[in-house]
Image (cartoon, helix red, strand yellow):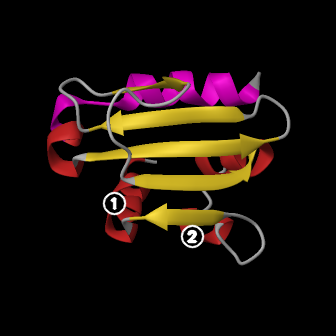
Amino acid sequence: GPVAETFRVIQGAVTEEYVRSTQGVFQFELSGDGGGTWYIDLKTKGGSAGFGKPPVTVDVVMSMSSADFVKMFTDKQKLFMAFMPGNSCIKGDMMLTLSLEKML
């Protein structure tokens, strides 16, 4: 599905340099089609992204619909546009969220 496809693209975009500069772990709680718990690990050497709980401690948890998530990454709409009140919620380090935006 589109969510899995998006994470495949993200996994391919993760670079060693990016992991070094970000040092953050993001967990996504997605509702709807292809939803569930997904993660992007930009802290562990090499980095990773995929389905399930991240292998290390999470810095930021974002909850949103899977449709919004896919839109956020594919339409290049700014991350924070996706986080209008009522749409979704972020818990954790907002500065890290900004660094994730750079990767998109």
Q: Majority secondary structure of the magenta segment?
A: helix
Element class at badge 1: helix
- Residue 90 seen in render: yes
Q: CA distance from mark 2 to mark 1?
A: 13 Å
Q: Which residue is mark 1?
A: 96
64 shown above or below 73: below
Q: What amino acid is found at the position of numbered circle 2 in the picture?
A: Phe
**Magenta region: which residues?**
2-17
Q: Which residue is mark 2?
A: 80
Q: Nearer the viewer, residue 37 or 46?
A: 37
Element class at badge 2: helix
Instruction: Give residue 55's position: percent from left, percent from top.
Output: 36, 26
The residue shown at (35%, 35%) is 41
User: Are there few (<14), some (14-19), or many (20+) residues within 10 Å of tag 1?
Assistant: some
Instruction: Give residue 81's position: percent from left, percent from top.
Output: 64, 70
Q: Earlier in the sequence, mark 2 or mark 1?
A: 2
Q: What amino acid is found at the position of numbered circle 1 in the picture?
A: Leu
